[in-house]
Image (cartoon, rainbow, N blue to C red):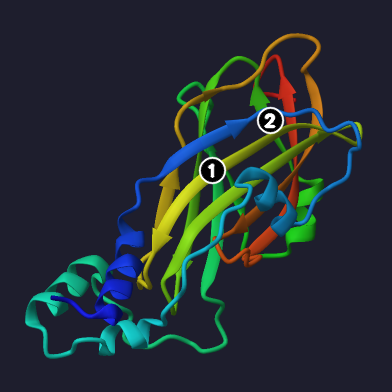
Amino acid sequence: MLGLDACELGAQLLELLRLALCARVLLTDKEGGRRPPDEALDEAVPGYQAPGRKSLLEIQQLDGDDESLAKYKQVLLGSLPLAVDPSLPNVQVTRLTLMSEQAPGPMTMDLTGELAELKNQVFVLKEGVDYKVKITFKVNKEIVSGLKCLHHTYRRGLRVDKTVYMVGSYGPSAQEYEFVTPVEEAPRGALVRGAYVVTSFFTDDDRADHLSWEWGLHICQDWKS
């Protein structure tokens, strides 16, 4: 029978197998206040308490003489990076892409540069089209549990929409991860056309602020603004 440490290990590793799901919540925020990631997450998943964490080194050292458990860990963790720059953050969000088969091409924002410049960059979305969002990121050092991407959308200072994407749990890898949301339909009609400001957060079960940024969105009758 597995001891207590092995049970904790199993719970930690099983986090990596959680199925990604998407929960969309539509709200109108009359106060118009822009909320920090921890408060936004509390609102999205009220009362949630993250499980205890073990470092990757602790996981690798647990039950080192158990061959079957070692194979199990190898399957879940995959090939780990040989060396990582210690100055790098554990989670790096590199790109966010709006994709639509009806669009002239994908619309990608680079999240590795100066984020303040994205406030002046407007992404045009044609009303009524189907679209998906692709989030590209890396995990460099430790297992990260319960990654979430939140988008708060504002118009004329009032929050008109909130979307929460449950991205999942991931281990360190030399390769980038990609998470693609389910297909959604852009709103249509004269009342919804116009300019919006989106505040995005990339956080996790520990409420770490991996990245926060603002960007512009313009819903138009055509792809040309």
> Going 81% across and 47% down the picture, which residue do you hit?
120
* Label 1 to label 2: alpha-carbon separation: 21 Å
Quarter of the image where one finds residue 81: bottom left
> Going 35% across and 71% down the picture, which residue do you hit?
173
Identity of the amino acid at label 2? Val
> Going 63% across and 63% down the picture, which residue do you hit?
207
Q: What element carries label 1?
A: strand
Q: In this view, does 118 lie to the left or right of 179?
A: right
Please state which of the two labelled residues, at mark 1 or mark 2, is closer to the viewer.
1
**Residue 155 drawn above or below residue 88:** above
Across and down, in percent, residue 56 comes to 37, 81
**Residue 206 drawn above or below residue 42:** below
**Label 2 packing within 10 angstroms: few (<14), some (14-19), many (20+):** many
Q: Is mark 2 on a helix, strand or loop?
A: strand
> Going 73% across and 64% down the picture, which residue do you hit?
114
Give the number of the disc on residue 165. 1
Dot 1 or dot 2: first in sequence order is 2
Across and down, in percent, residue 211 comes to 65, 62
Proximity of marks 1 and 2: CB atoms separated by less than 8 Å: no
Total marks shown come to 2
**Label 1 packing within 10 angstroms: few (<14), some (14-19), many (20+):** many
> Which residue is the site of mark 2?
124
